[in-house]
């Protein structure tokens, strides 16, 4: 084990995850639910690489197949005994990769850099991303699969919009902090804008502090050092904006702040603990408002049947499926839950050339379900999953907030 | 009746007997080892797996410490594949007698024991789960050793030098004619056949059973006092180095990481019968308390198995006190020619696993001298089969092996990562083996599920590929589960209780293993 590997795991969080392996009774429920194991023998399964292999880990990393884990977290979610399976896998991968990280994994986890590089050249970037030979070159050089779903570069950023934005009406309620995330800042700009407009429509004063990356992509690529520094920096930036609820429409980044950075990397900074307790997924926030009787029910009907996929990283937050509850308030709307554990992309997993086929196979039943339910339109809470679903189905795929926005007459 | 002949018959297939048969064979004697059960099924595997650095003895007996240090280095080389060079620490906790740490240093210098004093912070960096109230810490060269692999390694080496290893052969008589040993009579317990071995020499290495064996040659009143030691294995390694308390040796002051588990030991209670070792709950609880002191949270961790072993202490007032040339510390050699007037039989007792090779050398030297031969010991010169490359065991070995073959082969024991091929190959070589015999070499059923899943798979494979009848397989399965259960019930709480419940639903609730038709024959 390299010294970097030691430092990656030299924290109490790993000891906790490791101690949880004692709870495994070999029931195999995790393996029956693992979306990757269902489609490929290349992955040896969550029980194997988690509680079993962990008993053998000291010194050199010898089980490289654990890299086929997509980190979707389904195993931890379904384990009836409380074994931190996904966390153990993520930590073991960080040790394995310490010292020999492929350039690709470093690059695609730099979400801010990617967004900044692509924005001013959006039309060119989009054209280039659609040109086969250029993508083949990218695959050969840095290992991103040439057919992998890529974000659509946007000619405007959320930050650019926000600078020129004035609320349509004066605030009548309290202040909220909006956390847009990298993808919500550069790629899925529309979702961020609609989220802010809905919150302002409900009477809230929205503030948007300058904010960096949460480090999730780095964490899932095993770059704990960089990811820990990023998440703490972000927590401090959000904390400085005030002691109020923080709202995000970036489902997986919310999970990073809520629990992943702490449970996987053992980050114990008090700013993270504070921010993690205050952050809400926007649909979760709307559901809380409704349960408190504070959400007006003046939704206009939308006559449509919509497939909805709840992303793995959203389910891992243990808050149920708030979008499903909130969308029930829209008259005429029929939302059909996908029932799929994962779309396959799992952050940056499905972009990689050696995992592209696995990720497509994981997503296949979900693609089929969407095509059968509504081939033109689907909803899903997180950015990379939407890219995967758009690529896999050809449908328009929005964040659930888009339907709320529309139903409130804002679009 | 089968007739065999040998220069020397070694009784007992533990560490000492295996060492003696190897030593005799390497010196050119035709040697036969007889063992009433499987190799290493007595004291030699019912221990905590510690390869002593000598640190434990340096205060009370620096000579003994020095002996351990020398043998430790030899075993790491000749039994490379059975040893993990984990390193170890002796540490004090706030409130411990500080002068003991100074005495340790004094003794270590006399014994020339490799050690260095390190800071408590360094200990906690290397072993984060150790008690944060650690004060003084000594780093030593403790290691861990697989007792079964040691015994098998020594026996395979002996076989390569022409020795015969007869397991499940119980000695039923030793014929003495004219004041000299003439032959050894055995019962082959698997076939029921009588076996007579003509020999001029018997070396009795039967440990706690030494008195019973000596009596067969008419040598009575060999005073063996079995000392029971209780040990508990935890489901994963809470430490990756051996950790010892730096205090006067006491109960439960060592935690040893062996293979995938870590073992705490031990106690020392005099008992009457080495064949009936109790596992008193109070002693098991005492071990868990002792573990908690060294590694906070130990009690909440999952215990998977408990067992007891019997130390083979011989306290014989008829030992010739002047004959110390051949003595190893804590070991006793009885020459029955001077003691009882029976020529051609020696008995050895006491000692410890770390110095097994030295004990074997000492007693073989006595025989060689009495026979008037000049054949020097070479057991420290060459590695046993399987250890030729000199590479020590690492806990990641099996994970590495399964990573290599997992797409081609099936994993039968998931906890201990035993593949189907490992199982079927050993079964083919030992068609009469019981599941426990296979377990001792493969670690089948020794992990957290304690056989709940793998024993059922193994039973099916034994029928499909080993040609076992369903009746025989069911009987073998029942015996295996029964033996696992002996070590399970004293530690049934927390996580292991949940496992036992699930296993019981499968084995009793779903499969009703107790009521299946099974062979009436006694299964060994």
Image (spheres, helix red, strand yellow):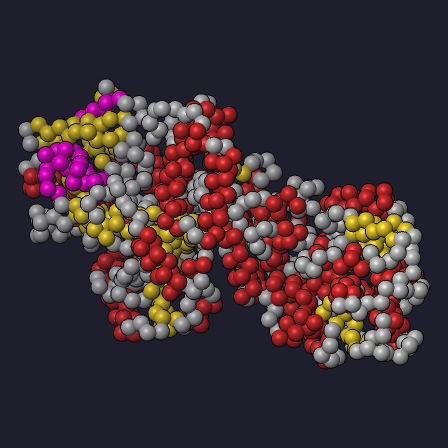
Residue A384 at least partly seen: no
Which residue appears at 81% of the width and 65% of the height? A184
Location of the C terminus of chain B (image quadrant): top left
Relative to A186, is B391 above or below? above
Residue B143 lies in what quarter of the image?
bottom left
Farthest residue, direction front: A293
Relative to B242, is B26 above or below? above
Which residue appears at 50% of the width and 29% of the height? B460
In the image, B367: left or right of A180?
Answer: left
Q: Is residue B127 magenta?
A: no
Location of the N terminus of chain B (image quadrant): top left
Pinpoint residue A112: horizontal percent, then vertical percent. Answer: 78, 67
In the image, A257: left or right of B352?
Answer: right
Pinpoint residue B199: horizontal percent, then vertical percent. Answer: 17, 29
Which residue appears at 47% of the width and 28% of the height? B462
Q: Which residues are magenta?
A: B193-222
Q: Front-most of A212 and B380?
A: A212
Q: Is residue B198 magenta?
A: yes
Pinpoint residue A66: horizontal percent, then vertical percent. Answer: 62, 50
Which residue appears at 73% of the width and 50% of the height? A342
Residue B302 at least partly seen: yes
In the image, B111: left or right of A202?
Answer: left
Q: How many marks?
A: 0
Farthest residue, direction top: B1
Residue A231 lies in what quarter of the image?
bottom right
Pinpoint residue B113: horizontal percent, then vertical percent. Answer: 30, 63
Q: Front-most of B159 and B33?
A: B33
């Amino acid at each position: 084990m390299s010294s970097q590997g030691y430092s990656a795991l030299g924290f109490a969080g790993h000891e906790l995850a490791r101690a949880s392996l004692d709870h495994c009774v070999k029931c195999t429920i995790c393996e029956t639910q693992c979306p990757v194991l269902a489609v490929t023998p290349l992955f040896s399964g969550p029980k194997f690489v988690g509680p079993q292999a962990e008993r053998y880990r000291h010194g050199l990393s010898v089980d490289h197949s654990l890299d086929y884990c997509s980190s979707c977290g389904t195993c931890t979610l379904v384990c009836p005994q409380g074994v931190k399976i996904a966390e153990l896998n993520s930590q073991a991968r960080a040790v394995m990769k310490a010292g020999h990280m492929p350039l690709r994994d470093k690059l695609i986890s730099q979400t801010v850099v990617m967004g900044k590089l692509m924005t001013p050249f959006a039309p060119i970037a989009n054209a280039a991303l659609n040109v086969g030979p250029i993508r083949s070159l990218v695959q050969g050089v840095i290992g991103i699969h040439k057919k992998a779903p890529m974000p659509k570069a946007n000619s405007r950023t959320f930050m650019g919009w926000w600078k020129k934005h004035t609320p349509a009406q004066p605030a009548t309620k309290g202040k909220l902090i909006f956390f847009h995330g990298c993808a919500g800042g550069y790629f899925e700009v529309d979702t961020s804008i609609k989220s802010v407009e809905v919150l302002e429509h409900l009477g809230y004063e929205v503030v948007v502090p300058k904010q960096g990356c949460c480090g999730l992509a780095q964490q899932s690529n095993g770059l704990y050092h960089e990811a820990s520094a990023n998440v703490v920096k972000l927590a401090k930036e959000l904390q400085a904006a005030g002691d109020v609820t923080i709202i995000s429409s970036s489902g997986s980044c919310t999970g990073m702040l809520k629990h992943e950075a702490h449970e996987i990397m053992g980050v114990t900074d008090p700013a993270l603990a504070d921010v993690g307790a205050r952050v809400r997924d926007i649909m979760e926030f709307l559901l809380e408002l409704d349960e408190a009787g504070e959400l007006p029910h003046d939704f206009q009907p939308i006559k449509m049947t919509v497939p909805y996929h709840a992303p793995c990283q959203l389910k891992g937050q243990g808050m149920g499926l708030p979008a499903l509850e909130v969308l029930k308030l829209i008259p005429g709307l029929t939302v059909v839950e996908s029932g799929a554990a994962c779309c396959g992309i799992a952050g940056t997993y499905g972009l990689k050339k050696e995992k592209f086929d696995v990720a497509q196979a994981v997503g296949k039943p979900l693609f089929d379900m969407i095509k059968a339910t509504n081939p033109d339109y689907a909803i899903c809470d997180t950015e990379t999953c939407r890219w995967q679903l758009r690529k896999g189905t050809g449908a328009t795929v929005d964040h659930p907030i888009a339907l709320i926005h529309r139903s409130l007459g804002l679009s | 009746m089968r007739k065999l002949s040998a220069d020397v018959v070694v009784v007992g297939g533990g560490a000492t007997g295996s060492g003696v048969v190897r030593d005799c064979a390497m010196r050119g004697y035709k040697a036969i080892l007889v063992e009433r059960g499987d190799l290493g099924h007595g004291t030699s595997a019912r221990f905590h797996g510690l390869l002593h650095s000598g640190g434990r003895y340096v205060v009370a007996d620096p000579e003994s410490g020095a002996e351990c240090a020398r043998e430790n280095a030899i075993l790491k080389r000749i039994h490379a594949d059975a040893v993990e060079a984990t390193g170890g620490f002796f540490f004090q906790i706030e409130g411990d007698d500080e002068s003991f740490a100074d005495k340790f240093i004094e003794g270590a210098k006399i014994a020339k024991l490799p050690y260095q004093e390190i800071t408590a912070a360094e200990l906690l960096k290397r072993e984060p789960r150790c008690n944060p109230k650690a004060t003084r810490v000594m780093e030593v060269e403790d290691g861990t050793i697989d007792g079964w692999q040691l015994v098998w390694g020594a026996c395979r080496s002996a076989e390569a030098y022409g020795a015969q290893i007869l397991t499940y052969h119980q000695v039923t008589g030793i014929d003495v004619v004219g004041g000299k040993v003439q032959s050894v009579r055995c019962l082959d317990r698997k076939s029921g056949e009588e076996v007579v071995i003509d020999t001029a020499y018997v070396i009795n290495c039967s440990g706690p059973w030494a008195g019973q064996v000596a009596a067969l040659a008419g040598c009575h009143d060999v005073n063996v006092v079995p000392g029971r030691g209780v040990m508990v294995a935890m489901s994963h390694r809470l430490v990756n180095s051996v950790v010892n308390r730096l205090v006067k040796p006491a109960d439960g002051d060592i935690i040893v990481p062996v293979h995938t588990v870590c073992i705490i030991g031990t106690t020392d209670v005099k008992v009457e019968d080495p064949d009936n070792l109790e596992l008193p709950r109070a002693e098991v609880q005492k071990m868990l308390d002792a573990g908690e002191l060294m590694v906070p949270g130990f009690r909440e961790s999952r215990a998977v198995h408990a067992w007891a072993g019997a130390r083979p202490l011989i306290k014989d007032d008829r030992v010739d006190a002047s004959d110390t040339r051949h003595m190893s510390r804590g070991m006793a050699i009885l020459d029955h020619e001077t003691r009882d007037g029976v020529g051609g039989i020696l008995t050895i007792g006491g000692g410890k696993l770390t110095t097994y090779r030295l004990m074997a050398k000492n007693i073989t030297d006595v025989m060689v001298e009495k026979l008037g031969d000049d054949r020097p010991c070479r057991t420290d010169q060459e590695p046993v089969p399987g250890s030729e490359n000199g590479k020590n065991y690492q806990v990641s070995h099996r994970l590495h092996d399964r990573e290599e073959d997992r797409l081609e082969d099936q994993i039968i024991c998931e906890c201990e990562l035993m593949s189907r091929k490992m199982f079927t190959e050993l079964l083919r070589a030992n068609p009469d083996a019981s599941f426990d015999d296979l377990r001792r070499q493969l670690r089948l059923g020794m992990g957290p599920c304690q056989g709940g899943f793998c024993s059922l798979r193994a039973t099916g494979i034994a029928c499909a590929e080993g040609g076992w009848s369903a009746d025989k397989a069911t009987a073998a399965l029942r015996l295996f589960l029964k033996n696992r259960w002996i070590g399970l019930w004293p530690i049934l709480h927390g996580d292991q209780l949940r496992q036992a419940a699930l296993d019981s639903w499968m084995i009793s609730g779903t499969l009703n293993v107790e009521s299946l038709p099974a062979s009436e024959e006694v299964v060994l």
